[in-house]
Amino acid sequence: MRDPTFWILARASGLTAYALLTLSVLAGLVVKSKPFGPAVKQAAATDLHRFLALLGLGAIALHGTALVLDSTVKISPAALVVPGLSPYRPLWTALGVLAAELMVLVYLSFALRRRIGGRNWRRLHWATYAIFALATAHGLLSGTDSRQAWAGWLYVGALGAVVTATAWRALSTPAARTARLPQPSPRPATQTANTGGS
Amino acid sequence: MSTYRITIDRSVCSGFGSCADLAPQAFAVGADGIATALVVETDDPAVLDAAASCPMAAITVEEVGKQEAA
């Protein structure tokens, strides 16, 4: 009898990766639109956002490894990086490969943002919406659990949360951002932050 | 104790506010949603963390040594 361990692991890690991606996107939107005001520290929210993305990438790595090790569907290591090589639902698995590759790119771009420039980093970050859409389509259309009611609720919940948070972001961006105020003069250069001075 | 000189590229800053969280004595996000430096120089090494945390890489912190600015 075929051992289903890797097949179960592949499905569970795929769903886990999707949940972590969703949470990372939501944390990123919290960083951007600050819906909780000063109650949530920006630096902490940014750390959480990046940590969830890293955990998500770990789950994706596990998802791919389990799929290669499993014998239910024949997936080669090359199929993990080249979209369309999977014999199982090639189009829908290709979306997952693309989403994972884009996610790696966006994750690494944070460390490279000084080299590529803040504006280019932010432009690249718009790809996150494409990653979420690709991952949703990939999960729904190639996931074997998609017909289960609980999986349906997972996708509905994730989509609903991300669409709602994105709408909040779009509506909450202050118009004042477009008209930057002149920079107020800093205090004299001799002043230091510590009251005791240097 | 080192002294650090702060520069913010306000054309790049997107107002995330991590800097003001990590070094509130040196950074604040203004009414326009853009960060400003409250001091030009400081001896507080927290500004290094603040610069490193900026998602837009808009903050530059230079170590200018021990000497007092003129």
Image (cartoon, coloured by chain):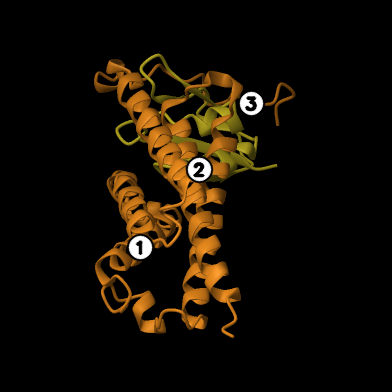
Chain colours: A orange, B yellow
Disc 2 marks which amino acid? Leu
Q: Are marks 1 and 3 on the same chain?
A: yes
Q: Does residue A171 lie above or below A140 as drawn?
A: above
Q: What's the residue at 27%, 46% (across, down)? A: A123
- The single residue placed furthest to the right in the displayed view is A196
Parent chain of label 1: A
Front position among marks 2 and 1: 1
Picture disc at residue A23 = 2
- The location of residue B60, given as percent across then percent down, is 45, 42
Of residues A108 and A190, the one drawn nearer to the viewer in this rendering:
A108
Q: Which of the two discs, 2 and 1, labels the residue nearer the N terminus? A: 2
- The location of residue A168, given as percent across then percent down, is 37, 24
Query: Can you see residue B70?
Result: no
In terms of secondary structure, where does tag 1 sit? helix
Q: Which of the two discs, 3 and 2, labels the residue nearer the N terminus? A: 2
3D distance between C-alphas at marks 3 and 2 = 37 Å
Picture disc at residue A142 = 1
Front position among marks 1 and 3: 1
Front position among marks 3 and 2: 2
